[in-house]
Amino acid sequence: MVPLIVILVLLIPILAIVLDSDVGKAFARRLERGKRALGDDGSHDRLVYLESELERLGKEMGRLEEESQFLQKLLAEHTDPDALPPGGGTGASDPN
């Protein structure tokens, strides 16, 4: 009895991960497409394509937003490499 419970406890998170992945979503779309009437003049295929493109574009926008935030952070922390450090530089005394 205990091994069955352990197997179920391990399968639940794995199943959740698979169903939330792109593979699980594609499988769900395929099942949904099979339930549709065959006389559909391609509008369902176009809708599925548009939904997948919208999802892809959303992910791409998220990636671009992260890149933009990273670049803004770098620019905010950027210092001029040619600027002298405070206090006069190397500490060598003036010969005059």
Image (cartoon, rainbow, N blue to C red):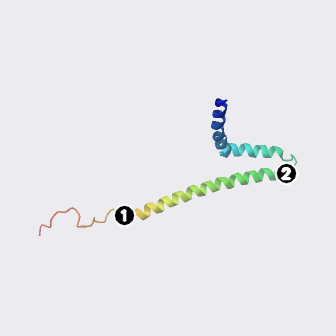
Check disc 1 and report the residue beneath it: 79
- Structural crowding at the residue carrying mark 1, measured as other residues with C-alpha within 10 Å and reported as few (<14), some (14–19) or many (≥20): few
Amino acid type at circle 1 is: Thr
Considering only vertical position in the picture, is 53 above or below 15? below
Residue at image location 70% in from the left, 46% down from the top? 25
70 w.r.t. 23: above or below: below
Q: Secondary structure at mark 1?
A: loop
For the point 39% across and 63% down, which residue is it? Answer: 78
Query: Badge 2: few (under 14), some or many (20 or more) residues near its Cα, within 10 Å?
Result: few
The picture places residue 96, in percent across and down from the top left corner, at: 11, 70
Q: Would you name the residue on which mark 2 appears?
A: 41
Tell me which corner region of the image, top left, top right, bottom left or bottom right, holds residue 12: top right
Q: What residue is at 70 percent from the left and 51 percent from the top? A: 52
Query: In the figure, residue 27 lies in which quadrant?
Result: top right
Q: Quadrant of residue 94?
A: bottom left
Residue 39 in the figure: left or right of residue 58: right
